[in-house]
Amino acid sequence: MTAEVPTQALAGLRDRFDGRVMLPGQDGYDDARQVWNARHDHRPALIAQPVSAGDAAAAVAFAREHGLGVCVRGGGRSEEHTSE
């Protein structure tokens, strides 16, 4: 079962979030929720794709405020860091 996210609260998150926030039924939601192991078919209340540390903090705070679980999914960028 997917938790409901209050519309007004979601608008507040979107106001302070530079990345993408998706709900079930929106374009990109199903692609974003898929993982390599097809046996796991989770349907989160929302998917937040942060573009900064501030976005990540806002998403975690939002989840805490609304009693939502958090799952971090890595990917998107694979940068190699070297020290000079």
Image (cartoon, grey):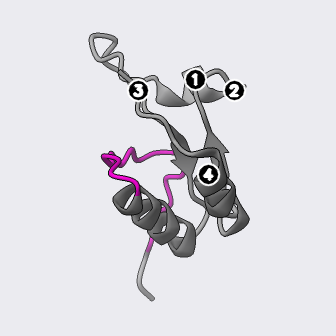
Residue name at image x 54 percent, y 75 percent: 54
Q: Which image quadrant is residue 19 in? A: bottom right
Location of the N terminus (image quadrant): top left
Residue 41 against residue 58 in the figure, above or below: above
Q: Amino acid at mark 2?
A: Gln
Q: Secondary structure beneath disc 1?
A: helix
N-term-proximal mark, 1 vs 2: 2
> How much space separates mark 2 and mark 4, taking CA atoms?
14 Å
Mark 3 and mark 1 residues within 8 Å of each other at the beta carbon: no
The residue labelled by disc 4 is 10
Mark 2 and mark 4 residues within 8 Å of each other at the beta carbon: no
N-term-proximal mark, 2 vs 3: 3
Residue positioned most to the left: 39
The residue labelled by disc 2 is 26
Give the main secondary structure of the magenta stretch.
loop
Q: In the drawing, what numbered circle is on residue 31?
A: 1
N-term-proximal mark, 3 vs 1: 3
Label 4 environment density (alpha carbons within 10 Å; few <14, some 14–19, many ≥20) = some
Region of the chain picked out in magenta, as a range: 66-81
Q: Position of residue 24 (x, y in %)?
A: 58, 25
Label 3 environment density (alpha carbons within 10 Å; few <14, some 14–19, many ≥20) = few
Q: Position of residue 49 (x, y in %)?
A: 57, 50
Mark 1 and mark 4 residues within 8 Å of each other at the beta carbon: no
Mark 1 and mark 2 residues within 8 Å of each other at the beta carbon: no
Residue name at image x 42 percent, y 24 percent: 43
